[in-house]
Image (tube, rainbow, N blue to C red):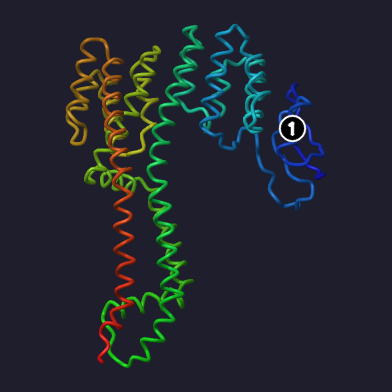
Amino acid sequence: MPIYRYKARKDSGVVVDGRIEARTEKDAIEKLGQEGYLPISIEEAGGTADQPIRPIGRAAHRIRSRSITVFSRELASLIKSGVPILNAIDIIAEQSEDPRLKVILRDIHSAIRDGESLSAALSQYPNIFSGLYVAMVRAGENSGALPDVLFKIADHRVKQEEVMSKLRMASIYPILMGAVGLATVIFMLTFVMPRLMQVFGRLGQELPLPTKILISISRALRTQWKVILLITLAAVLFFRGQMQTRAARMSSSVLKLRLPILGRFILKAELARFCRTLELLIRNGIPILKAINIAIPVLNNEVIKNQFTQSYKDLEQGGSFGRSLKGSAFFPAFLSNLIIVGEESGRLDEALAEVASSYERDVDEVVKIIGNLLEPLMILVMGLVVGFIVMAMLLPVFSINI
């Protein structure tokens, strides 16, 4: 079996180096955990000296969202049943099938045993446990209702995962069809078309314009495919680099919101996510200013994020949260009016819940409509492309002078 070299931390906090025999890296991590070690890094001993050791501690492999949701629900159930939190985390770590999550849970277990709170231990993994998650847990610790808060976190995550799952399911068929269609077109242009070009050359007559266009595309794909690939790759990298700048992100965000149909969908999806998050925070006793500050990062659109940031500043200076939203060119009156009513009645959490529920229903409807429309739209687009290719191939035959 392979030998793995590792760095690990003992329960006492001492960091040790060593080697361990295991079939796979996963087995090595599990063996170290069973021996009471917290792995920091691990690599196969046969690797080269300059090969970087892969971190598996705080620096973070991403953990699946579903795993964190399951962890939240299991931890809530165990604590509510009277199991001490250290024992609960230990039980979940033992049952987990994800070796990376095992490592993280054992680190959290050690931190709590050393005197840290659960929220403080979770905050050491910001890429896994978001600011919202940590703030909710801290509120649960302070109120003595940690199990209930964890159940709410799990329910909230399940709803978010359901929305993402619906979007993925709606896009699978169009993506698959687009990939198959693109492969078909490339096959026709690079394999079928060159053989037809030999036939067209023997006809000895002027070719129609569509056929000339198709021949040029076919020749470019066959002779300049490396150049085309490099240009495409360079364009993608350039676009990604540009999107790192604030100006480009802002322009992209404005463009998305102004798109027909999709713009309203994006706006409602963002507002539903923000209002649901803010409602969850306020309902669990987090002050409004802190709650808004935590909820803003859940947004992806820079325009919407900037508007809520401005509203946060207005509220900080003694203004009204709802009235500051009323002046936005993008936000619907329904949102600002309900928030104003919620502020005046002292039931802001209920108003936010109503807004979130309304927009979530709208988003679900749009997802269904888009899913139903994309299939015939993709069929139409691919039909037009393939139809043009077939027509361009047959036109010279139809125009033969007999």
Q: Residue at 25%, 85% (x, y): give it.
A: 399
Percent across and percent down for residue 280 are 38, 18
Q: Is residue 297 left or right of residue 348?
A: right
Q: Is residue 212 left or right of residue 113?
A: left
Percent across and percent down for residue 299 are 36, 34
Q: Which residue is mark 1?
A: 8
Query: SS for tag 1?
Result: strand
Question: Where on the picture, by quarter, is residue 382?
Answer: bottom left
Q: Is residue 105 left or right of residue 214?
A: right
Question: Where on the picture, by quarter, is residue 181?
Answer: bottom left
Question: Nearest the camera: 333 or 165?
Answer: 165
- Quadrant showing the C terminus: bottom left
Please determine whether, in this image, residue 159 is positioned above or below residue 330.
above
Q: Is residue 181 left or right of residue 106?
A: left
Please determine whether, in this image, residue 50 is positioned above or below residue 166.
below
Percent across and percent down for residue 340 are 20, 18
Question: Nearest the camera: 360 or 402?
Answer: 402
Please determine whether, in this image, residue 256 is positioned above or below residue 8.
below
Percent across and percent down for residue 108 are 62, 22
Decide: few, some or many residues near mark 1? Use Cα within 10 Å; few <14, some 14-19, many ≥20.
Answer: many
Question: Where on the picture, by quarter, is residue 298?
Answer: top left
Marks counted in the figure total 1
Q: Residue at 49%, 22% (x, y): give it.
A: 134
- Quadrant showing the N terminus: top right
For badge 1, the amino acid type reads: Ala
Q: Residue at 41%, 77% (x, y): give it.
A: 193
Q: Residue furthest front?
A: 402
